[in-house]
Image (cartoon, grey):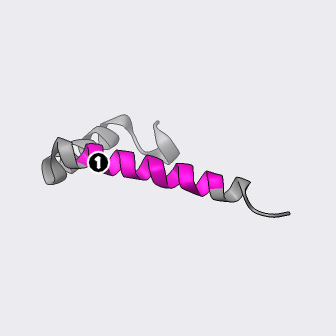
Amino acid sequence: MGLSGVSMGSLILIFLIAVLLFGTDKLKDLGSDLGKAIKGFKKALDDEPS
């Protein structure tokens, strides 16, 4: 069992479809943008005035 009942085979299949649809360069950009968004969100939570 993988994440929340999704098998490892299903995760691999989803990843392969994403690579076919977007290509590796687009996925790298998407991953870095997602990382920056999460980092910004965490910073905004920490900067929240109490």
Where is residue 41, by image quadrant?
Answer: bottom right
Residue at image mark 1: 29
- Residue drawn at (39%, 39%) of the image: 7
Where is residue 13, by image quadrant?
Answer: top left
Q: Is residue 14 visible?
A: no
Q: Is residue 29 magenta?
A: yes
Q: Which residues are magenta?
A: 27-43
Where is residue 25, by image quadrant?
Answer: top left
Classed neighbour count for the residue bearing mark 1: other residues with Cα under 10 Å, few (<14), some (14–19), many (≥20): few
In percent of width and height, residue 43 lies at: 64, 52
Q: Is residue 9 visible?
A: yes
- Residue drawn at (80%, 64%) of the image: 49
As drawn, is 44 to the left or to the right of 22? right
User: Which of 35/20 is in front?
Assistant: 35
User: Which of 40/28 is in front?
Assistant: 40
**In the current view of this chain or complex, which residue is farthest to the right?**
50
User: Which of 3/23 is in front?
Assistant: 23
